[in-house]
Amino acid sequence: GAVVSQHPSRVICKSGTSVKIECRSLDFQATTMFWYRQFPKKSLMLMATSNEGSKATYEQGVEKDKFLINHASLTLSTLTVTSAHPEDSSFYICSARGQQGRGETQYFGPGTRLLVL
Amino acid sequence: GQNIDQPTEMTATEGAIVQINCTYQTSGFNGLFWYQQHAGEAPTFLSYNVLDGLEEKGRFSSFLSRSKGYSYLLLKELQMKDSASYLCAVRSATDSWGKLQFGAGTQVVVTP
């Protein structure tokens, strides 16, 4: 089946630093990528929608200057958490949408666990 | 907007069958997804239905009735590893990027 990778899988950083998370679709071209955040025992929360070659669309309440998204190609999107603070500690998951085989797919990456000290 | 309802929790014994129902209301339907999510992990794709009927994939099957706004995920021959949260997600035809709206998830507990 399709594979979506994320790197790094886990990161610990000091407050005030920036962290970049990469999301790659490995065996299909992703027309659209989505970035989610999930707190423990809570539902997935969509942060933004990313399309190759265009600006990301952010959900209400998500600061676009804090969560920078770049979709450089049909297989790569990056999320940069700028000036991270402890409240940004969460599980960040990307999802890639594309065509594979006989139909539509939307697969999740394995997630990146961020801990800000 | 979209409303997606699924039960909060279901318990079943190993080897049994469990059916997780999902009802939805959407302004324009463009597909329904089921995902499995184990604690501390990202969701894993299980199935995608866009036309009415049953899609079977091994021990898992998913059914869709668009006229009723209803889907179910059927898990057969339950195994302990099937203990997880199962997420129903709907894509609206009115969203140009294909965003998914997720239900809160159904926690399935498989007992020996």
Image: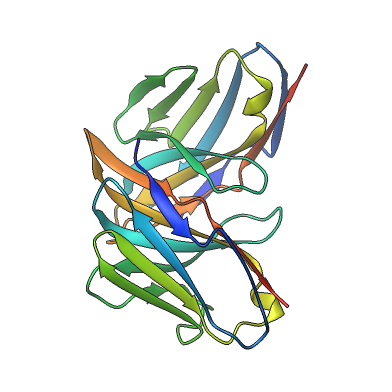
Vertical relation: B13 (above or below) B33: above
Compared across the picture, whether A113 is left or right of B53 comes to: right
Compared across the picture, whether A108 is left or right of A28 comes to: right
x 55%, y 41%: residue = B87
Q: Is residue B1 visible?
A: no
Q: Residue furthest right?
A: B112
Q: Quadrant of the C terminus of chain A?
A: bottom right
Vertical relation: A105 (above or below) A63: above
Q: Quadrant of residue B84?
A: top right
x 71%, y 53%: residue = A41
Q: How far across and how far down the image is residue A108, in percent?
A: 45, 49
Q: How is the image coloured?
A: rainbow
Report the front residue among B81 and B7: B81
Vertical relation: B92 (above or below) A92: above
Q: Is residue B62 visible?
A: yes
Q: How many marks?
A: 0
Q: Quadrant of the N terminus of chain A?
A: top left
Q: How far across and how far down the image is residue B33, in percent?
A: 42, 40
Report the front residue among B4 and A83: A83
x 39%, y 75%: residue = A69
Q: How far across and how far down the image is residue B55, in percent?
A: 37, 22
x 44%, y 26%: residue = B62
Q: How far across and how far down the image is residue A77, in percent?
A: 35, 66
